Amino acid sequence: MGLKSMLKNKELKEILKPILPTKFTFSTNLGWNIEAFSKHYKLLVTNQLTDKSDAKLVGIAFDYMARFIIANHIEINKKRALENMVCEKGFELLNNVLEGYIFDIEKRLYEDKIKRIENYILNCSNDDYDNIILDVLTISRFEQIYRCRTEYIIPIIEDARIKDFELRED
């Protein structure tokens, strides 16, 4: 279940309602005279994404990272963070598109990434989440595959391999 759909749950809304901050409880590092979320201060980091699908990918990856970071910090039911992930459905679509041996390679890579994420959730007691960022980006691409039409699957996979290689080189 995605974060967005969780926030539509009426019971959860009732639980969160009394503790939700207002925009006035936030502050900026720019001084007390400038309100948070104001348009009166200079944008510090500009959006340099040129492709709308990259912006969607960042949003999906953010949802997964939030899910895994929260799971890392809770005490019980940590593994539930790995249940019902949309990326699984996207990965299964590959079985219909890729040749058998290529799918087997992708499956091993996918399982390795999920294992690293699971290890982070279950065994890390700190905020050392930079070890899973590229793994989360990959599984986010699988969710993106599920949400888009089938003819875009191969270009997304090829693009993911190139970007993953470039990021690991840095």
Image (cartoon, rainbow, N blue to C red):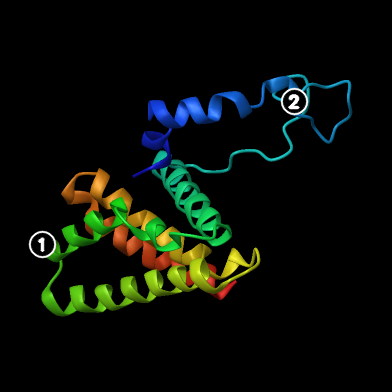
Quadrant position of the C terminus in the picture: bottom right
Quadrant position of the N terminus in the picture: top left
Q: Amino acid at mark 2?
A: Thr
The front one of 102 and 5 is: 5
Q: Is residue 135 left or right of residue 127?
A: left
Q: Is residue 126 left or right of residue 117?
A: right
* Mark 1 and mark 2 residues within 8 Å of each other at the beta carbon: no
- Disc marking residue 96: 1
Q: Residue 105, percent across and down?
A: 25, 79
**Mark before the other along the chain sequence, 1 or 2:** 2
Q: Residue 79, percent across and down?
A: 40, 63
Image quarter of residue 154 = bottom left
Residue found at x 39% / y 43%: 53
Q: Secondary structure at mark 1?
A: helix
Image quarter of residue 35 = top right
**Location of residue 1 with respect to 21 vertically, above or below:** below
The front one of 69 and 13 is: 13
Q: Residue 104, percent across and down?
A: 20, 78
- Disc marking residue 25: 2
**Location of residue 70 with respect to 12 vertically, above or below:** below
In this view of the protein, can residue 38 be seen by the observer? Answer: no
Q: Is residue 65 left or right of residue 37?
A: left
Query: Quick one: label 2, few (<14), some, or many (20+) residues within 10 Å?
Result: few
Q: Residue 153, percent across and down?
A: 23, 55
Q: Secondary structure at mark 2?
A: helix
Residue found at x 54% / y 74%: 123
The mark closer to the camera, 1 or 2, is 2
